[in-house]
Image: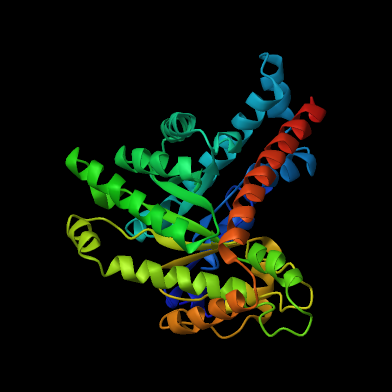
Amino acid sequence: MSTSRLAAIERQGQAIWLDSIKRSYLGEGNYLDQLISDGDIYGLTSNPSIFASAVAGSDEYDEQVASLAAEGKDAAAILWEVMKADITFACDQFADLYASSDGLHGYVSIEVDPSKAFDTDGTIEQGRALWNKIDRPNLMVKVPGTEPGLAAITALIGEGVNVNVTLLFSVDRYQQVMSAYMDGLAQARDAGRNLASIASVASFFVSRVDAKVDPMLPEDSDLRGRVAIANAQAAFTAFMEVCMSERWKELSASGAAVQRPLWASTSTKDPSYPDTLYVDELVGPNTVNTVPEATLDAVRDHGAEPTDRLSGTGPAAVRTLSALSDAGIDLDQVTKELETEGVEKFIASFEEAVATVDEAL
């Protein structure tokens, strides 16, 4: 049994996923292989910005990029081929973990084109195409949790596609996402699909909430640095309530797996806060936390002793969020703005990634 702090987090019921990928990480004996072997990570997430940095930062993609360009493909098409190639390789590296954990661990996420965040049909079409093209049972397709994304979540889950719902900031939207997931499971069950083979996580963004709220608070407010964690605790409470519902119990009896909350954006934005804050305070059962390399290293080196810090935190979260309202800050409005900004940032990142590939041609 690994004695690392990261493995100890998994023993509390939380899977740490790496929020990064580079071609140099892939292959036997390389970085990803070592992290998996050491029990430090149990999955991986990606986005176009990560791939932009990977392509710009090394010559490992030059041959593939040149070959695809010679076939007449443009920069956007080349980017998709690069992403699909690396994600497929990563899925294969996690395959043994996926199999040995009976499908609990070993997932790798790829994001649909963020420009389709408000296009239900477009999201479904691309999510289905990525699922069929990569053709790995431990793939997850990242779908923005916007209002138009809800129907896409239901449709893709109903078809047996694993979905990572991303860009969640509010508990209300998260509750809608959980309902959309259950709707999809019901459709899959009615179509005769094996519910045990369908997996989903709901990516609830954390640090961006504090980054947005803190400047709205007085310098001496004791709410600074606490709202994001309270918001996540409220989300976890909502998740537990769904798990106890009759609707969920019926789906579970048919073999369905819970849609685990995934804590995203967990690198600390404010340098005055501990660099492991959004990992230390959000350990709990049936959850995932996706972290970049720097946060992974920090947790391994000096993170807090892992213990369940989520169960039973609902009342404290309510008090914190009520105090925020009393301070004149409308969290609903904040999270709406964060969703809009999040989609805009995702689109900008995708365009940046395409530009990076274009520069490499």
**Which residue is painted at 69% across and 46% down in the image?**
345
**Split into 4 quadrants, where in the image is the C terminus?**
top right
Residue located farthest toward the right when viewing the structure as drawn = 359
**Which residue is painted at 54% across and 43% down in the image?**
110
Rendered position, 354 above or below 181: above
Q: Quadrant of residue 290?
A: bottom right
Is 133 positioned to the left or the right of 103 in the image?
right
Q: How many marks?
A: 0
Residue 314 visible in the shown view = yes
> Camera-side residue: 108 or 241?
241
State the image coordinates of residue 19 (x, y, percent, origin top left). Answer: 61, 56
Q: Quadrant of residue 104?
A: bottom left
State the image coordinates of residue 92 (x, y, percent, origin top left). Answer: 47, 45
Rendered position, 243 above or below 335: below
**Split into 4 quadrants, where in the image is the N terminus?**
bottom left
Residue 14 visible in the shown view = no
Rendered position, 300 above or below 335: below
Rendered position, 340 above or below 10: above
State the image coordinates of residue 36 (x, y, percent, origin top left). Answer: 53, 61
State the image coordinates of residue 97 (x, y, percent, origin top left). Answer: 42, 57
Is 325 positioned to the left or the right of 122 in the image?
right
> Camera-side residue: 159 or 184?
184
Is 261 positioned to the left or the right of 68 in the image?
left
Is 223 positioned to the left or the right of 171 in the image?
right
Coloring scheme used:
rainbow
**Which residue is painted at 78% across and 34% down in the image?**
356
